[in-house]
Image (cartoon, rainbow, N blue to C red):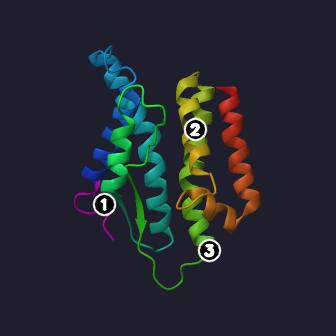
Amino acid sequence: MPLFYKGELVELLVAVTAVFAVFAGSFAWSLTPVSAAKLFLLAFVIYAPHELAHKFVAEYYGFPARFQISPMLLALTLISAIPYMPLKFIVPGAVRVYVHSGYSRSIDGKISAAGPLVSVALGFVALLSGLKWLAMFSGWISLFNLLPLGPLDGRKVLFWSPPFWALLMGASLFLLLLS
């Protein structure tokens, strides 16, 4: 299995750029090159590790996985980048896991928990480092993804392990309260 599939890193970069556009949208008229670079770094740090955690855990369990842009979700993310848009959606793509025999609710839950777990861990490291803004964004990404709705991570984590889902949800809320 290759570490990354052809075009996968480009799609991840496009997704990170879309996330950056959402963050930058509210500041579009006042961004400097330095503040834009900081926002891009923020977008990369909170989005890429979350998605790559899903990929690498799936591959650890023997299931090929690939980050893919979703054209419809990318469009929704870019619409969210319009300045002063009241609702923001950051969902330009997701990791697609190629399942085969041996895939179970437990493995699905662990793969789904990997992203929010990395976001929570990153948030606490940021908080301990005095980077409250990074901790806050990490907490929001984790909290949103843990909602037990539709294709979000939360539904799969909750079906696999309600106690672990509650622990991650509590950690996400705690992170938001502290940041």
**Residue 31 image offset from top left, x and y in percent:** 32, 17
Disc 1 to disc 3, C-alpha distance? 25 Å
Look at the image and tell me in which quarter the N terminus lies: bottom left
Asked if residue 22 lies left or right of residue 60, the reply is: left
Say whether disc 1 or disc 2 marks the residue closer to the N-terminus: 1
Q: Residue at x 55, y 37 (%)?
A: 138
Labelled disc at residue 4: 1
Q: CA distance from mark 2 to mark 3?
A: 25 Å
Q: Secondary structure at mark 3?
A: helix
First in residue order: circle 1 vs circle 3:
1
Residue 100 or residue 141, whichever sits in front: 141
Which of the two residues, 59 or 162, is positioned nearer the viewer here?
A: 162
Which callout, 2 or 3, points at the residue further toward the start of the chain?
A: 3
Question: Circle 2 is placed at which residue position?
Answer: 140
Q: Which label is found at residue 120?
A: none
The residue type indicated by label 2 comes to: Trp
Q: Camera-side residue: 158 or 83?
A: 83
Which kind of residue does numbered mark 3 sit on? Arg
Residue 52 falls within the magenta-colored stretch: no
Residue range highlighted in magenta: 1-8
